[in-house]
Structure formats: structure tokens, C-alpha cells
């Protein structure tokens, strides 16, 4: 049995989960998310708990069992608590600012980068003297948040010699030794 798939999803107060024709909709104080479920995976909902079960021990059923349980759990946690990701800009002259849903980045190129963010994501930029600028992204949709954070990181990935670039807070960059004389 899948260790992830067999664990029960607890529904917190203020969150409602509805299942209609293989589409799970989760509504909470932060927002609303929906996910289509395929492959014969079934959901049982009782006493504020959801159990995900599979029809057989086939390899594709085993894979979908854990996947859909994780997706539904992320929807429940996102609509009740939300998710945040922090990115750090390491490098001289690297700057970040935002106005509304537009993020402006200066990453050492000849031009600035302007990124229009989806309305589901809230952004905050923090710039303190003597410290690296930090971009904080928060949303109730974990998949969308990860995609946007990866897109921002892809503009200037951290390089292994000086560690310059856009990295996640807490990410460890494997460093290489430079030229030996």
C-alpha cells in the first residue's frame, strides 16, 4: 500500500470539499481550487476526513493513488493556510521591486526584467541595506506558486563559483574551486 496514498486527509474548519463526477472542489477562506480525478481512484468523505482508495494493485493505479492524495491534501492546506516561497537575489547590483502584480528585476543584464504575476499570487519585496534583496511569494495554489518561483529563478540561476544568482532562501549551492595557480 502506498504510504502517502493510505494516509487520511483531515479537513479543517471553514473548508468544504465536494466531489461531482470525478471533479474535486475545495473551498476555503483563502480561495477555491478544483482537480479532476481519473484512473478509477475513489474518494470517501466522512466526519471531516477524506480517504483515497485505488481499484487494484496495478502499477498505474499505485502511482495515481499517491499523486491524487497529495494533490487533494495540497488543495486543502492551501485554501485553509496558504503557501509561501522566498527567493534571495545574491549579487552586486541585483535589485527587486514590485508595483501591483508586476515584478521588476535588475539581475546584471543590460535591461531590466518585468514579470506580470497571476492574480492568485501576492508578492512582497524586501530590500535592507547590507543584505540581499528577498522576494516573498504567497498563494493558495501550490502548483502555480512553484511554477512562478521557478520562472523567477530561471532568469539567473546561481552559479557555482561565486554563488551569484536567484536562489531559494535556505538553498545550498554546491561551490567549485576557481583556477589554481
Image (cartoon, grey):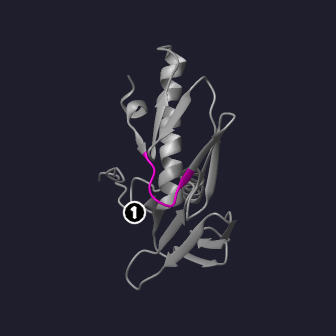
Q: Is residue 22 above or below residue 84?
A: above
Q: Residue furthest front?
A: 47
* Part of the protein shown in magenta: 10-16
Residue 75: percent from left, percent from top: 54, 50
From the viewer's perspective, is 127 left or right of 23? left
Examine the residues drawn in magenta and state their main secondary structure: loop
Q: Is residue 72 above or below residue 2?
A: below
From the viewer's perspective, is 121 left or right of 116? left
| Residue 157 in view (yes/no) | no
Magenta stretch: includes residue 86: no
Magenta stretch: includes residue 14: yes
Classify residue 90 by image quadrant.
bottom left
Say which residue appears at 50% left-offset and 13% top-offset.
58
| Count of numbered circles on the image | 1
Classify residue 28 by image quadrant.
bottom right
Say which residue appears at 50% left-offset and 70% top-offset.
135
Classify residue 120 by image quadrant.
bottom right
Q: For the residue labelled by badge 1, is the local secondary structure a helix, a strand or a loop?
A: loop
Q: Quadrant of the N terminus?
A: top left
From the viewer's perspective, is 165 left or right of 115? left
Q: Nearer the viewer, residue 171 or 113?
A: 171
Residue 15: percent from left, percent from top: 52, 56
Q: Which residue is mark 1?
A: 169
Amino acid at each position: 500500500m502506498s504510504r502517502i496514498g493510505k494516509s487520511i486527509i483531515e479537513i479543517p474548519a471553514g473548508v468544504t470539499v465536494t466531489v461531482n463526477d470525478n471533479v474535486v472542489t475545495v473551498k476555503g477562506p483563502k480561495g477555491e481550487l478544483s482537480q479532476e480525478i481519473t484512473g478509477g481512484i475513489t474518494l470517501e468523505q466522512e466526519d471531516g476526513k477524506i480517504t483515497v482508495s485505488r481499484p487494484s494493485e496495478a502499477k498505474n493505479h499505485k502511482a495515481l493513488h499517491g499523486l491524487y492524495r497529495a494533490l487533494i491534501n495540497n488543495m486543502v492546506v492551501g485554501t485553509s493556510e496558504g503557501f509561501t516561497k522566498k527567493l534571495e537575489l545574491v549579487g552586486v547590483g541585483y535589485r527587486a521591486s514590485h508595483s501591483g502584480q508586476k515584478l521588476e528585476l535588475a539581475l546584471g543584464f543590460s535591461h531590466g526584467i518585468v514579470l506580470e504575476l497571476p492574480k492568485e499570487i501576492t508578492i512582497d519585496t524586501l530590500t535592507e541595506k547590507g543584505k540581499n534583496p528577498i522576494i516573498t511569494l504567497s498563494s493558495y495554489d501550490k502548483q502555480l506558486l512553484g511554477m512562478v518561483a521557478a520562472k523567477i529563478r530561471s532568469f539567473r540561476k546561481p552559479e557555482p563559483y561565486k554563488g551569484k544568482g536567484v536562489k531559494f532562501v535556505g538553498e545550498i549551492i554546491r561551490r567549485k574551486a576557481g583556477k589554481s595557480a
